[in-house]
């Protein structure tokens, strides 16, 4: 009898799992799709799935082809059913043709995040001891390509190449929330004056503001250009590279770092969401972020954040006085009698670059604008 009950239970579980898997599919999903140049993995997942971050649950790699997890223009994505469960697989029209990994479609478009991959860095420690630009030839205010700059703060040797970086934003969060809401902070800084007013060239248009007592999450710098040491000394003489932006006195020098990034990650839900993960900064000058805008978030690798993880963004509900149930104004405004409104869903963001305590994400879809201090939660809502 027990074996029979266990058998019935197993069948019920399998049937339920199959039903749930089938419900993940869009009602208008195609049976096959030929991958086009310019497609992204997020786009393709969205053609078949209501929730693109469930791609790992339905994707089945073909072990008979090279690089089975990569998808190329011209590949045919086919929907099939295995034991009643929907699965997606890829067929190569000409599997004998050797393909370069760089030709594979990316998870998100490179051009939408390129500057944050190639130019931006978030440092774990305050870069107060980095070498710096002392002056520019002929006492210029700005240095352009092919011009000479003078730098101090390192043992410079002829032939060395240095990256010239500019401080942008310092990210921080206060350990003690107010009314349950975390206090975020992001302010501009430079090596010479510390915190500064707004400066030109910053990537972020709007970000949270900060004070003493905050835990610093990171110091962000943007690569400006590179320079090569021509004469050692104190100060050393360097020649600015042909490409790049203008250099100023006070810019910092760091070792040249070839941009290493991966845009072939898989969209997926996180195993857990860090406590009070929030939006720190947005790129739009209207202080909001919409689809295909980049945001900075207050969690990173130390919190388990990885590229490809998808989070839902929410605007935290306000606490309001219930003047219907409490006619007395003083009574209605007591914190203990206020009613917290539900958090309002905004959209989804996918992580594409992580640092230790900060990460960058791309807003993938939104039904209302996202902004600083919005919360990140598990992606359990439909786009």
Image: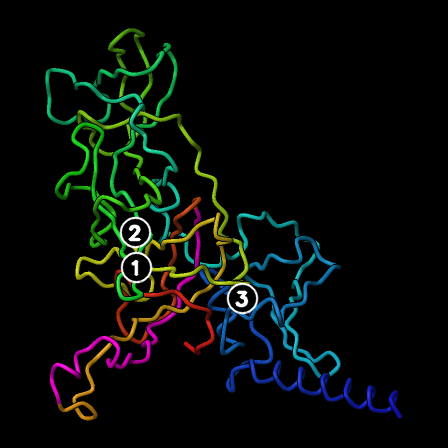
Distance in Å between CA atoms under marks 3 and 2: 47 Å
Query: Which of disc 2 and disc 3 is earlier in sequence?
Result: 3
Q: Residue 315: where, in percent of width, then height?
A: 29, 71
Residue found at x 26% / y 45% = 213
Q: Is residue 329 above or below residue 259?
A: below
| Depth check, front residue: 298 or 27 | 298
Query: Which of disc 3 and disc 1 is earlier in sequence?
Result: 3
Dividing the picture into quarters, in which one does residue 189 lie?
Answer: top left
Q: Are marks 1 and 3 in contact (CB under 8 Å)?
A: no
The magenta segment is 328-354
Crowding around mark 1 (Cα neighbors within 10 Å: few <14, some 14 to 19, many 20+) is few
Q: Secondary structure at mark 3?
A: loop
Q: Residue 351: where, in percent of width, then height?
A: 44, 57
Residue bearing mark 3: 35
Distance in Å between CA atoms under marks 1 and 3: 47 Å
Residue 306 visible to the viewer = no
**Residue 62 colored magenta?**
no
Residue bearing mark 1: 177
Residue bearing mark 2: 174
């Amino acid at each position: 009898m027990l074996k029979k009950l266990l058998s019935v239970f197993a069948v019920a579980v399998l049937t339920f799992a199959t039903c749930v898997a089938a419900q993940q599919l869009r009602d208008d999903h195609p049976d096959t799709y030929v991958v086009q140049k310019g497609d992204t993995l997020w786009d393709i997942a969205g053609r078949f799935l209501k929730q693109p971050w469930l791609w790992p649950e339905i994707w089945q790699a073909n072990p008979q082809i090279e690089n089975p997890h990569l998808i190329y223009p011209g590949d045919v994505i086919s929907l099939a059913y295995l034991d009643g469960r929907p699965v997606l697989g890829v067929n190569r029209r000409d599997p004998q043709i050797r393909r370069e990994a760089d030709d594979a479609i990316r998870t998100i478009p490179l051009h939408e995040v390129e500057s944050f991959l190639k130019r931006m860095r978030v440092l774990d420690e305050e870069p107060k001891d980095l070498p710096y630009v002392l002056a520019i030839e002929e006492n210029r205010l700005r240095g352009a390509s092919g011009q000479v700059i003078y730098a101090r703060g390192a043992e410079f040797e002829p032939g060395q190449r240095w990256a010239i970086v500019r401080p942008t934003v310092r990210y921080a969060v206060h350990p003690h929330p107010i009314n349950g809401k975390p206090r975020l902070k992001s302010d501009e800084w430079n090596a010479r004056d510390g915190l500064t007013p707004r400066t030109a060239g910053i990537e972020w248009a709007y970000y949270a503001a900060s004070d003493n007592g905050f835990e610093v999450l990171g110091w962000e710098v943007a690569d400006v250009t590179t320079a090569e040491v021509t004469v050692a000394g104190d100060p050393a003489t360097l020649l600015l590279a042909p490409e790049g932006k203008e250099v100023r006195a006070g810019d910092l020098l760091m070792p040249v770092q070839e941009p290493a990034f991966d845009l072939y990650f898989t969209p997926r839900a996180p195993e857990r969401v860090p406590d009070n993960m929030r939006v720190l900064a947005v790129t739009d000058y209207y202080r909001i972020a919409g689809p295909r805008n980049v945001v900075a978030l207050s969690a990173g690798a130390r919190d388990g954040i990885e590229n490809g993880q998808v989070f839902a963004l929410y605007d935290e509900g306000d606490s309001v006085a219930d003047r219907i149930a409490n006619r007395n104004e003083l009574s209605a405004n007591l914190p203990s009698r206020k009613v917290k409104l539900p958090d309002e869903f905004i959209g989804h963001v996918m992580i594409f670059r992580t640092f230790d305590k900060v990460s960058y994400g791309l807003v993938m879809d939104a039904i209302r604008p996202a902004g600083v201090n919005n919360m990140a939660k598990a992606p359990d809502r439909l786009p």
